[in-house]
Image (cartoon, rainbow, N blue to C red):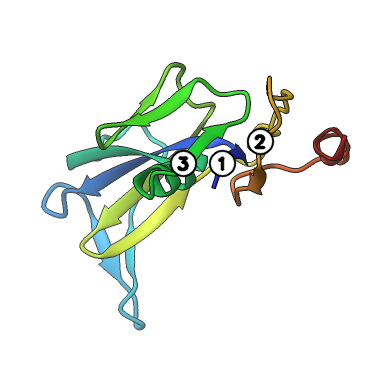
Amino acid sequence: MGTILIVGNITKDVYLRLDENQNKFERDENKVNWLDLAFDGSSHRFFSRVAIFGGAAVSMEVLSRFEIGAEIVNTAASFLSGQMIVKYAPETYRYILCRDDNISYLSPTLPPPTVWKAPGSPPNWIYIDRSAVITPELSERILN
């Protein structure tokens, strides 16, 4: 099949499972849980923290598991022996607060735009991942 160049951003999703015995939760009439979170210097406890790669890293993992050659544009990342290896820390982090099976996201207002660097040799395919932040300049550079 050849090689696939993935255009997108690697994110790091950090899941924090909140301790319901140590945090004050309320439940409304629709059975939605609410965390009483005041910006008064108080502490809020969690009992589990799990961090995983997201965004373009997921696309790379899926393609690699199908033994399709793939790389993420302008990123030193690879998928070897069932493990995602990223040389530099992602620029975008999402924090996912969890209570039971319910979640709430803390995400950046403006994720960094996707950076284009022309590959050394032309790929067979270009895949635009949903994590890509497309600007008119990026579109033009990809087309060129």
- The kind of secondary structure element at disc 2 is loop
List the single residue furthest toward the left. 21
Report the amino acid beneath label 1: Gly
Q: 36 left or right of 5?
A: left
What residue is shown at x 23% (from left), y 54% (from top)?
24
> Which element carries disc 3, helix, strand or loop?
helix
Q: Amino acid at mark 3?
A: Met
> What amino acid is found at the position of numbered circle 2 in the picture?
Pro
Mark 2 vs mark 3, CA separation in Å? 14 Å
How far across and down, in percent of the image, does residue 54 sit?
A: 43, 43
Q: Position of residue 73 (x, y in %)?
A: 62, 29
Q: Which mark is residue 72?
A: none
Task: Name the residue at 48% across, 47% down.
Answer: 59
Label annotation for residue 2: 1
Q: According to the image, label 3 marks what residue?
A: 60
- For residue 48, above or below residue 90: below
Front in this rendered view, residue 125 or 111: 125
Relative to residue 4, is residue 65 drawn left or right? left
Between 81 and 91, the residue placed more toward the observer is 81
Point out residue 7 in the picture as x, y percentages from the top left corner: 64, 39
Residue 123: assigned label: 2
Please indicate whether residue 103 sits to the left or right of residue 116 in the image. Answer: left
Q: Quick one: label 3, few (<14), some, or many (20+) residues within 10 Å? A: many
**Mark 1 to mark 3 CA distance (whole Å):** 14 Å
Q: Is residue 118 above or below residue 113?
A: above
Residues at circles 1 and 2 in contact by the CB criterion of under 8 Å: yes
Residue name at image x 44 percent, y 51 percent: 105
